[in-house]
Amino acid sequence: MKTTSRLIAGLLAALLAAVPIHHAAAQESDWKLEPDARIEVQTVSAQTTTRDDDLVIDGEAISLRGQVGLALNSKKTRFRIEADRIEVFRLGNGRDDIARDRFTAAAEFDINKKLELQLQARHFDDMVSVEANDTDEWQGAARVTWEPRRAHRFRLQGTWREREYADGALPETKGEGPRVDAQYRHRFGAYHYLAFDLRAESISSDDPRRGYERQSVGAAYTYPIKPDLRVRPAIEAIRTRFDDRLTINNDRRKDTLVAPEVEVLWWPGKWRVEAEAKYIFVGSNEPVREREGYRLTLSVGYAF
């Protein structure tokens, strides 16, 4: 992880250089220290089947999430550190519970009224990734947001990721690679948006089973029924090609996923109630990997 350490050290140096000490002292009264926290309970019910309905897989789970954060904000500069943990309790026989920790440090700078820069460093512990069920990750990211008018917002983000994979009794293996995200959002009014997202990412690994390339495209429409109640239909399409996972014909495995969904968000006061219904279609040049099925999610959270 030497490359990541240098990357994060560079990010921290950039953050310090961006806010001169004498300016911070002169504007001390403008800075606000704002702690926050959030707790959330989520239930998930999912079912997938093969195309011939020969295999049916059901899955239910309950998860608990706790998050604490601390923000230091001024008129044009915002710093934030955050930690959260998710405990997932999988229901049913033979399914292990899982947990994931995440730590984030970020800074945002208003370059001018239309342009914003964000720098971020993040660490994941024991997360589930595309290529493995137990992954530790360090990442550094830079994001630029340009909003020439309230109706139009453009975002471009570049992220570098370095990963370590746990593999039971075998030695840990590593992977690394970039991710690029682009988004355009059109604002019709308060809480009323149409957004388009593009993503391209790849991981190279000393374990060929872990390497992959992935591209995705998505669109989401948010409509406010009331100020605290919104509905959000969306659709996403993902294409993944693995480096060394071969089909029965010795071709590289290629998977495609299409997932239409609808989400309802009800945020009365500090409560956060969110319900999501998603149907997932998975195609592959490896027939046994073809699946389709639903995923229903209900989460109830409270922000302090």
Image: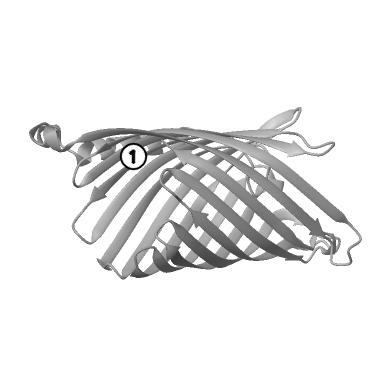
Question: Quick one: label 1, few (<14), some, or many (20+) residues within 10 Å?
Answer: many
Specify the farthest residue to the left: 26
From what the image shows, is residue 144 above or below residue 9?
below
Q: Who is closer to the viewer here, 285 or 155?
A: 155
Q: Position of residue 269 (x, y in %)?
A: 41, 46
Which residue carries the number 1 mark? 11
Q: Position of residue 264 (x, y in %)?
A: 54, 59
Residue 208 visible within the image: no
| Numbered disc 1: secondary structure | helix
Colouring scheme applied when the structure was drawn: one colour
Horizontal side of residue 100 vs 138, given as left or right: right
From what the image shows, is residue 302 above or below residue 230?
above
At 25% from the left edge and 59% from the top edge, which residue is drawn?
115
Horizontal side of residue 176 vs 242, given as left or right: left
At 42% from the left edge and 54% from the top edge, which residue is drawn?
158
The C terminus: image quadrant: top left
Which amino acid type corresponds to the residue marked 1 in the rendered image?
A: Leu
Question: For residue 36, what is the image quadrant?
Answer: top left
At 59% from the left edge and 54% from the top edge, which residue is drawn?
275
Question: For residue 34, what is the image quadrant?
Answer: top left
Residue 175 visible within the image: yes
Specify the farthest residue to the right: 54
Q: Who is closer to the viewer here, 140 or 249?
A: 140
Horizontal side of residue 149 vs 239, given as left or right: left
Q: Where is residue 118 in the image (x, y as percent from the top left)?
A: 32, 48
Q: Where is residue 216 in the image (x, y as percent from the top left)?
A: 57, 64
Horizontal side of residue 101 vs 60, given as left or right: left
